[in-house]
Image: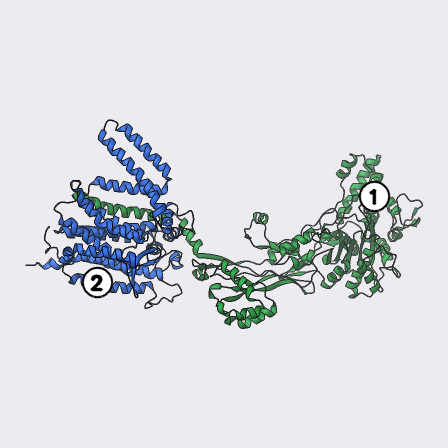
């Protein structure tokens, strides 16, 4: 019996030891339970900051945060026998009430969920007064991006949910799934400044997810910091007017302040209403916009590439003058048409050649640039000439991006030696193969932004600033004072500007603006796919220029019609503040440029 | 003449008792505590306040126990047992069904659970029978073993019929008493083998298990081919194993109620379905496991405060201990329990009267079973069968049962000099 008694006592001790060891393994050895316990009770909630507001150059609000008010319901606190007031305030039937109530209940009886989305302002006001009579209901506010104008979509861009790809690329680890991020436009470029800083709030929740107060009295909580506001260089009035002018057309308008590189207007047509991509209905609207055959999401000023056409003659002229291949007052006689030309036969100096846009004059000038007679072989000679020429062209900002503060800018195309080597073989090509370049056709491709920047260079007689859209981030003024200069003597510009002025600033010309002396050059860009594109580049006024501008209107034919008219109106609007030429305005708005000359 | 220490109540046991009651009450208070500070000491909606009333009422019961003549239990042993059986039968017909089991009488606002009373009565009845026999339980007197077993198998069966499997299993613990009184170690071994096989049946597919039994049988056949006696044992054991496996399957699928089936199944893999049947055990383990070595501190448990643990003042009160007091606190409390049980065993062994000794062993068996199984189920070592932790779990009935079990023993012990030796 003694051994049995001992055995029983031993059994008690062993059992307690086993239990204690098991406790040790789950309490001390295994730390997983601690983590699971924290996950159980500590709920982390993100406090989203307000995104920065965006203003135009004059301080007019363009983009803001739209407060949206949702009516929330916590079903267990609702007195169902007293739903009269709710139905009255929302103008809903018993059936609708029941449906919304059932939906909320199926989500949770204890947690708030949306009962009625996006209350109108009137309904919201009515609710605010009666809120304490409505047990179980409360109003939750959130924000979506709100747009003061329906334009500017191509500039502002939009925000959307961060993608998995972006999450993978985010080395800072800032973004979490479900966050909003600037997808394109200013919203993307300045994302870091305007997104602000998220706040975090930790709170305890019970088994039903009900808030049981802050965790450790908020010791780990952080407050959200609102994003910085941006001031754009865009002139709201000009932008709006230019958008109106470009309505119904396909093309671009870019206006830049030559003295700073500040972009005054940047229009891409056709565009879309940016509010369609804000908040509710994003995915549905995005699909519609994306499927549009006219590609409204395509930011044409930066992304569309065209041959520069006759506008490029200004550059040919400058390079030839700088290289001393031609003198401004040298008379070149065009007595036969070596290439197609709308300009008449006759004698041309530089100014007249620009004004009349003589193809044959520039054919001859370009031949001098390319074949400078420095080598006996015409192939090697052309090669050397071309290379020098190309260096100048690149200085004008072509064939590379200008680094504007918007995403997806295109570089355009200035063919390299190797490019022609590949087509024709090394030392198998000469001037006769590339003469189309003389009139801005051939393989050259430029963006409307680059053309506007050419306007800036001409206006400044030889330099430009990096074109940009934002001048102030928060209280900090951005510095874009770095000049990019072109190695061309200032004196060479005058004859060309004279020719450009004669094109647009003579009474009777369609572009003529009484009292304003300005310069411009048109292009009728050959388009093998269809009707020619209409192009214009210029600046105003000739002295102390305030605006440089480029316009492309696709398939609109003569440069002297669509693009010139549109640019002239925009210049008048910006420089004079209002437009007097209503007939021209109507002509542009009507948009049928195949008509005979108006008047 | 009676000596001075004749009426001495065992001080150490009372100290252990008071310590456990106090610690228990503190943990009920913690489990029930509202973080927003509205917990009022006098609020009768608070479990801790009500528990204080039950504890107070138990003083009355203790007084009655000490006033009653010590010979009462011995003399009326069978009567007491009989009355409890009567109530167990009656509750089947007139009881109120609560949560799938019919184990309560409801008279006005008073609720009585006959199965609790049956624990005391069975302990007394068993002690009465075994002490009245001249010899102990041994293989030679199998009918004595049978009668002893019936004394607790009858209430056990009736309680199973009520649908309260957990309480019924408690009576199985009395086999320990039989072991003390001479039950052969072989029988104890067979009982344990049966329990092990039973658990394996739950864990492993029955066909695999049957195959394993067959394999063992063949191995045994090979080993003891020349020993006829051993072969008979092996053969018999295999047949019994086969029968047990099949009957467990039958019980599991035909006899047990659905919620009991789920509870048994949740033992098998509590992690598989955290929001389903294993949820209770999972949350219980999380609460205890998150306590760490030192615990989160008094009233600082989050899992229990925010209701993640079910039945946290009753069956899962040990979660509060584990979460707030950590491994150290939990182990110290278990050591206190252990010391208490060993003390009661010592008391049982010092009796001249076999009745008191057997009763003492019954008390220890019943309480120890509650203690071990309750803690084992909160840490996922045993299925959740819903039995309280003595002196810790909230509830008047169970608290009074344990108090009465203990103080009847202490009353009898205090007068051990007067007891006649059987």
Whether residue B400 is visible here, answered yes or no, is: yes
Q: Which residue is mark 2?
A: B61
Circle 2 chain: B
The quadrant in which the N terminus of chain A is found is: top left
The relative height of residue A147 versus residue A127 in the rendered view (above or below) is above
Q: Nearer the viewer, residue B18 or A429?
A: B18
Q: Nearer the viewer, residue A120 or A96?
A: A96
Q: Locate residue A576: give its quadrant.
A: bottom right
**Chain coloured blue in the rendered structure:** B
The quadrant in which the C terminus of chain A is found is: bottom right
Q: How is the image coloured?
A: by chain
Whether residue B10 is visible here, answered yes or no, is: no
Query: Few, some or many C-alpha atoms within 10 Å of disc 1 (few <14, some 14-19, many ≥20)?
Result: some
Please state if B47 lies on the left or on the right of B59 as rendered. right
Q: Which is closer to the viewer, label 2 or label 1? A: 2
Q: Locate residue A271: give its quadrant.
A: bottom right
In three-dimensional space, the C-alpha distance between marks 2 and 1, rounded to whole angstroms, equals: 116 Å
Identify the secondary structure beneath mark 2: helix
Image location (x, y in percent) of residue A115: 54, 63
Q: Which residue is mark 1?
A: A436
């Amino acid at each position: 019996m003694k051994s049995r008694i001992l055995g029983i006592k031993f059994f008690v001790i062993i059992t307690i030891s086993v239990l204690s060891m098991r406790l040790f393994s789950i309490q001390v050895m295994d730390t997983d339970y601690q983590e699971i316990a924290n996950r159980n009770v500590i709920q982390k909630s993100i406090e989203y900051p307000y995104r920065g507001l965006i203003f135009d150059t004059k301080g007019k609000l363009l983009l803001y945060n739209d407060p949206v008010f949702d009516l929330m319901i916590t079903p267990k606190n609702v007195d169902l026998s007293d739903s009269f007031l709710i139905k009255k305030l929302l103008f809903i039937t018993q059936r609708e009430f029941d449906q919304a109530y059932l939906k909320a209940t199926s989500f949770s009886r204890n947690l708030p969920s949306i009962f009625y989305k996006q209350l109108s302002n009137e309904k919201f006001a009515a609710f605010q007064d009666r809120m304490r009579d409505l047990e179980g209901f409360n109003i939750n506010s959130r924000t979506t991006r709100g747009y003061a104008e329906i334009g500017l979509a191509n500039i502002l861009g939009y925000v959307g949910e961060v993608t998995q790809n972006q999450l993978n690329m985010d080395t800072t680890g800032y973004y979490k799934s479900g966050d909003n991020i600037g997808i394109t436009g200013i919203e993307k470029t300045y994302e870091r400044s305007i997104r602000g800083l998220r706040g975090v709030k930790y709170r305890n929740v019970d088994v039903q997810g009900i808030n049981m107060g802050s965790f450790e009295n908020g010791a780990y909580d952080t407050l959200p910091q609102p994003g910085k506001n941006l001031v754009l260089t865009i002139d709201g009035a000009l932008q709006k007017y230019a958008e109106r002018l470009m309505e119904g057309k396909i093309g671009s308008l870019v206006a830049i302040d030559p003295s700073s590189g500040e972009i005054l207007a940047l229009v891409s047509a056709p565009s879309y209403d940016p509010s369609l991509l804000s908040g509710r209905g994003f995915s549905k609207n995005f699909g519609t916009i994306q499927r549009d055959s006219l590609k409204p999401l395509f930011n044409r000023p930066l992304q569309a590439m065209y041959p520069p056409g006759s506008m490029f003659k200004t550059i040919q002229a400058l390079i030839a003058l700088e290289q001393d291949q031609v003198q401004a007052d040298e008379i070149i006689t065009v007595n036969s048409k070596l290439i197609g030309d709308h300009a008449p036969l006759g004698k041309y100096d530089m100014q007249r050649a620009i004004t009349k846009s003589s193809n044959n004059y520039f054919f001859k000038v370009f031949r001098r640039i390319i074949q400078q007679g420095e080598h006996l072989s015409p192939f090697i000679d052309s090669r050397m000439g071309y290379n020098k020429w190309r260096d100048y062209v690149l200085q004008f900002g072509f064939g590379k991006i200008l680094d504007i503060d918007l995403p997806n800018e295109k570089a355009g195309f200035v063919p390299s030696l190797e490019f022609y080597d590949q087509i024709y073989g090394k030392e198998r090509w000469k001037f006769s193969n590339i003469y189309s370049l003389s009139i801005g056709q051939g393989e050259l491709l430029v963006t409307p932004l680059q053309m506007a920047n050419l306007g800036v260079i001409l206006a400044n007689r030889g330099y430009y600033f990096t074109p940009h859209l934002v001048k102030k981030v928060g209280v900090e003024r951005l510095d874009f004072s770095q000049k990019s200069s072109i190695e061309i003597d200032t004196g060479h510009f005058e004859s060309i500007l004279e020719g450009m002025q004669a094109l647009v600033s003579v009474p009777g010309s369609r572009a003529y603006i009484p009292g304003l002396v300005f310069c411009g050059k048109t292009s009728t860009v050959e388009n093998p796919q269809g009707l020619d594109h209409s192009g214009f580049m210029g600046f105003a006024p000739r002295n102390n220029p305030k605006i440089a501008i480029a316009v492309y209107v696709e398939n609109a034919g003569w440069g002297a019609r669509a693009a010139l008219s549109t640019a002239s109106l925009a210049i008048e609007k910006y420089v004079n503040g209002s437009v007097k030429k209503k007939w021209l305005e109507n002509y542009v708005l009507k948009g049928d440029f195949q008509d005979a000359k108006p008047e | 003449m009676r000596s001075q220490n004749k009426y001495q109540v065992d001080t150490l046991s009372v100290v252990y008792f008071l310590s456990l009651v106090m610690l228990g009450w503190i943990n009920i208070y913690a489990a029930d505590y509202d973080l927003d500070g509205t917990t009022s000491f006098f609020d009768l909606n608070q479990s801790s306040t009500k528990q204080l009333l039950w504890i107070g009422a138990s003083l009355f019961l203790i007084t009655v126990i000490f006033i009653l003549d010590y010979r009462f239990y011995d003399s009326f042993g069978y009567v007491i047992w009989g009355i409890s059986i009567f109530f167990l039968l009656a509750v089947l017909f007139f009881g109120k069904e609560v949560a799938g089991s019919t184990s309560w009488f409801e008279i006005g606002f008073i609720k009585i659970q006959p199965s609790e009373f049956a624990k005391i009565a069975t302990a007394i009845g068993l002690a009465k029978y075994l002490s009245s026999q001249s010899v102990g339980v041994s293989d030679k007197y199998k009918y004595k073993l049978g009668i002893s077993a019936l004394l607790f198998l009858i209430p056990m069966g009736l309680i199973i019929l009520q649908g309260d499997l957990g309480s019924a299993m408690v009576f199985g613990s009395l086999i320990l008493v039989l072991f003390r009184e001479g039950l052969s170690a072989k029988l104890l071994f067979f009982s344990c083998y049966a329990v092990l096989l039973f658990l394996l049946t739950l864990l492993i597919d029955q066909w695999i298990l049957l195959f394993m039994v067959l394999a063992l049988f063949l191995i045994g056949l090979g080993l003891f081919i020349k020993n006829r006696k051993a072969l008979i044992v092996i053969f018999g054991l295999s047949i019994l194993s086969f029968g047990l496996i099949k009957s467990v399957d039958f019980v599991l699928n035909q006899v047990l109620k659905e919620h009991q089936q789920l509870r048994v199944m949740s033992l098998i893999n509590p992690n598989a379905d955290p929001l389903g049947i294993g949820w209770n055990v999972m949350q219980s383990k999380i609460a205890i496991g998150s306590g760490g070595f030192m615990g989160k501190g008094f009233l600082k448990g989050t899992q229990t405060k925010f209701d993640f643990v079910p039945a946290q003042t009753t069956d899962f009160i040990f979660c509060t201990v584990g979460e707030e007091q950590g491994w150290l606190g939990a182990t110290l409390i278990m050591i206190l329990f252990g010391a208490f049980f060993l003390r009661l065993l010592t008391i049982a062994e010092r009796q001249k009267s076999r009745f008191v000794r057997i009763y003492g062993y019954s008390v220890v068996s019943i309480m120890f079973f509650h203690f071990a199984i309750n803690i084992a189920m909160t840490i996922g070592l045993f299925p959740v069968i819903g039995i309280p932790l003595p002196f810790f779990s909230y509830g008047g009935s169970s608290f009074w049962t344990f108090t009465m079990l203990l103080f009847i023993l202490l009353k009898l012990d205090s007068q051990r000099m007067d007891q006649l030796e059987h």
